[in-house]
Amino acid sequence: MNNALPKPRVAVHKFSSCDGCQLAFLNLGERLLSLAETVDILHFAEAGPIDEGAMVDIAFVEGSVATSRDAERLKRIRENSRYVITIGACATAGGIQALRNMHDSGEWLAGIYAQPGYLDLLPESSPIARIIKVDLELWGCPVNGEQVLAVTRALLVGHMPHVDQNAVCMECKRQHVVCVMVSQGKPCMGPVTQTGCGAICPKMQRDCYACFGPAIQANVSALSTHFAANGMLAREIAQRLLFINNQAEPFLGSGIQWQSQAAPNPTSSPGIK
C-alpha cells in the first residue's frame, strides 16, 4: 500500500515577454531536476509539460498583460493556484513593452497593420498585479534562478519567503566592489535598485541599469538630481528611469517629471521625449 503524500504541484505560465525568466529556470540544470523530484511540474511549455488549466500549489507567471484574452487567462490561473508569484520585470512592472503606455500605441498599430481593428490589444501593457492578486513578486531582467529556487523551497515547507529589497550598493559593499559612480563618475542606478543580481554590472565596471526594480525607500529624486548636477541631460535621466521597470514607482513618477523637462528628440526611445 502506497501511503506517500502527493507532491506539491507547480506551473510556469508565460504572457508577453522574451522567455528570459523561464530560461533562468532551465539554466538551473541539475538543481531544476532535483526540484522536479520533489514537486510535480504540471505546466511549463518551455520545458515540455502543458496543462494550463491545472490546479496547482504554486504558479509562476512571466510576462505582462497585453490583450483581453491575456487578462481572462490570468484570472483563471489565479482561481486555480494557491500562490501566484510573478517573475521578472515584465510581470512585476510591465517590462520594455509597457513603454507603449506613454505613447499613442494606436498610431503605431495604424502605421503597421492594414486593419488594426482586428487586433485584441488593451490600451496599456500591464503588470500582473494590476489584474489579479499576487502573493509574491520576484524582480529582475531576467529573474535570478537561484532566488526562484529558494522561494519555491520556502513555500514548500510552509514559510512565506523573504526577498532582500536592499539596494545594489549593499551587495557591492558585501563583495568589495569599487563604486563606479564614485570612482568613475558613471550614472549608476545601484543606490535605488533592489539587489538580487549579485551586482553583476558594477563587478564588470558598468553602471547599474535598474534591472531588479526599485529598492525599499529608494530616493530616486535625490539620485536623478545628482545625475543632472553632473551633466546628464533630462532626456537621458528619463530614459534611465523609464526603462526596464518603467511602470514601477517611484521610477515612473520621477521619470515622467524628467521627461517633461526634456527637449524634443526624434531619435529617442518611444515615449521618451
Image (cartoon, rainbow, N blue to C red):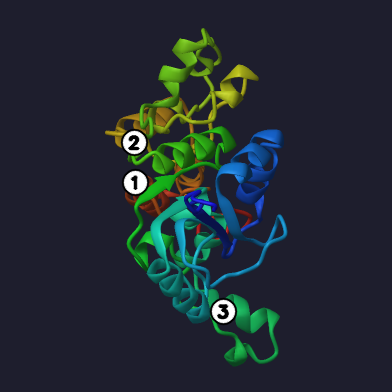
The answer to which of 167 and 231 lies nearer the viewer is: 167
Element on which disc 2 rests: helix
Q: Which residue is depicted at the point 58% across and 53% down?
A: 40
The answer to which of 153 and 188 lies nearer the viewer is: 153
Tell me which label, 1 or 2, sits earlier in the chain: 2
Q: Is 26 on the left-hand or right-hand side of 227?
A: right
Between marks 3 and 1, how big is the CA–CA gap?
26 Å
Q: Amino acid at mark 2?
A: Val
Which x, y percent locates residue 115? Answer: 66, 92
Q: Which residue is depicted at the point 32% across and 51% down?
A: 253
Which x, y percent locates residue 116? Answer: 62, 88
Determine which residue is flagged by label 1.
254
State if disc 2 and disc 1 touch (CB < 8 Å): yes
Between marks 1 and 2, how big is the CA–CA gap?
7 Å
Q: Residues within 10 Å of mark 1 (few under 14, many from 20)?
A: some
State if disc 1 and disc 3 touch (CB < 8 Å): no
Determine which residue is flagged by label 3.
107
State if disc 2 and disc 3 touch (CB < 8 Å): no
Determine which residue is flagged by label 2.
220
The answer to which of 57 and 161 lies nearer the viewer is: 57
Q: Which residue is depicted at the point 42% across and 33% down?
A: 193
Which x, y percent locates residue 164? Answer: 38, 30
